[in-house]
Image: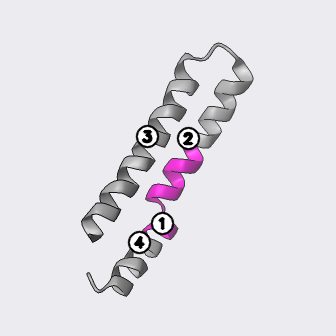
Amino acid sequence: MVLWLIGGYATLVAVWISCAVYVALFVRDKQRRADAYRVLKLIIGTATGTGGLVAALVRLHETGVL
């Protein structure tokens, strides 16, 4: 069950990153590209940052996996 939750989270983050990358690269509006790049930095920083890692480890410990 825990693997499904981790896989679902990873899939959701990958979809968010894909959408932000698409907008940042292929949209003609300069302001929307800048906003998408800012969102991309936020998503990647949150998903791979130490805060996200600590939260994931705490949650895994609570469920008894670690």
Are the residues tagged 1 and 2 within 8 Å (C-beta)? no
* Residue 30 percent location from the top left of the image: 71, 19
Relative to 16, does residue 33 appear above or below in the rendering?
A: above
Distance between mark 1 and mark 3 Cα atoms: 17 Å
Considering only order in the chain, which callout, 3 or 4, is on the residue closer to the N terminus?
Answer: 3
Instruction: Looking at the image, tell me whether mark 2 or mark 4 is earlier in sequence order.
Output: 2
Question: Mark 1 — residue?
Answer: 52
Regarding mark 2 in the picture, which secondary structure is present there?
Answer: helix
User: Which quadrant: the N terminus?
Assistant: bottom left
Given the image, on which type of amino acid does mark 3 rest? Val
Outermost residue, top side:
28
Report crowding for label 3: few under 14, some 14 to 19, many 20 or more residues within 10 A (C-alpha): few
Look at label 1 and name its amino acid: Gly
Residue 52 among magenta residues: yes
Residue 56 is marked as 4
Report how far apart the C-alphas of labels 4 and 3 lie in the structure: 19 Å
User: Which x, y percent locates residue 20?
Assistant: 54, 34
Viewer-proximal residue among 31 and 11:
11
- Label 1 CA crowd tier, 10 Å (few <14, some 14–19, many 20+): few
SS at mark 4? helix
Give the alpha-carbon distance from disc 3 to disc 2, as whole Å: 11 Å
Disc 2 marks which residue?
A: 40
**In this rendering, position of residue 4 left or right of residue 21:** left
Query: Dot 4, how many residues are within 10 Å of its Cα: few (below 14), some (14-19), or many (20+)?
Result: some
